[in-house]
Amino acid sequence: MFSLKVPYVQDVAPEVAGERALLLMLPGAKNTPQQLVEHGFICALRERRLPVDVLALDAPVDLYLERADIEQVLLHTLDEVSARGYRRIWLFGISLGGSGAMIAATRRGSEVAGVFLLAPFLGTRGIIAEVAAAGGLSHWRPGEVAERDHERALLDDLRNGLCVASELPPIYLGYGSEDRYRGASLMLAARLPARQVVECSGGHDWATWLQLWHVLLEQAAGGGWPFAAPAVDPDTCEVLR
């Protein structure tokens, strides 16, 4: 058992010899770790017999209102899992959970082996449109960042990590082609290697996210992710090569 600041669901990979990786999973707003179980996200790992233990946090939406609060939870969690001997730690975030994953990655990039993002929330439509109007993250400048402007601060961290210092771990991104929030994904996709980006037909929903998850598990092969090939339906998803 872990001593964490929020409730969690833990799932340990059975019959694993040797080193295990740990996947820290962050559900979206008003979603729970139990829904990740019910919708098959952990099953997708187990059916491939991957040596990956899962720790899914039940972080309420209110924690994200103050960056310091969610940051404290995430960094404490990373400290805990590192103390348990995990050396390959991957992050997974859906929607608002993607914001949390990137907060952790920008703060502790050297401790994170990689990040999976499904339709991540990285800012409201207004600030995402501002970045797009500037020509993308590499051309956008945040200006003066107010103390409570957490979205602008995160986007500036992403800009520095992706466009300036190139210090972030590998990011694997998936989103639905009809997702009403896909602007953030398009912004991020422009700064990622094409093979690390997957677009599926669908919206901002569990069915689309699960399909994306199956494909991203395949795409992460060779990037340090413990891999066993899944079955992929080529008619519904496209890797943006």
Image: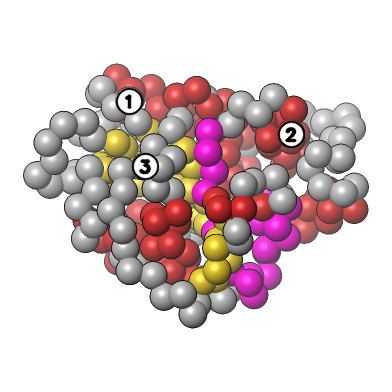
Q: Are marks 1 and 2 in contact (CB under 8 Å)?
A: no
Q: Earlier in the sequence, mark 1 or mark 2?
A: 1
Q: CA distance from mark 3 to mark 2?
A: 24 Å
Q: Quadrant of residue 225?
A: top left
Q: Which residue is mark 3?
A: 225
For the point 74% across and 34% down, the residue is 163
Looking at the rendered image, the quarter that the N terminus falls into is top left
At x 85% / y 35%, what residue is drawn?
142
**Mark 3 and mark 1: span between their CA atoms?**
12 Å
Give the residue type at disc 3. Answer: Trp
172 sits to left or right of 129: left
| Residue type, label 2 | Cys
Element carrying mark 3:
loop
Comparing 38 with 149, the one in front is 38
Quadrant position of the C terminus in the picture: bottom right
- Which residue is denoted by mark 2 in the rendering? 163
**Circle 2: element type:** helix
The magenta segment: 169-188
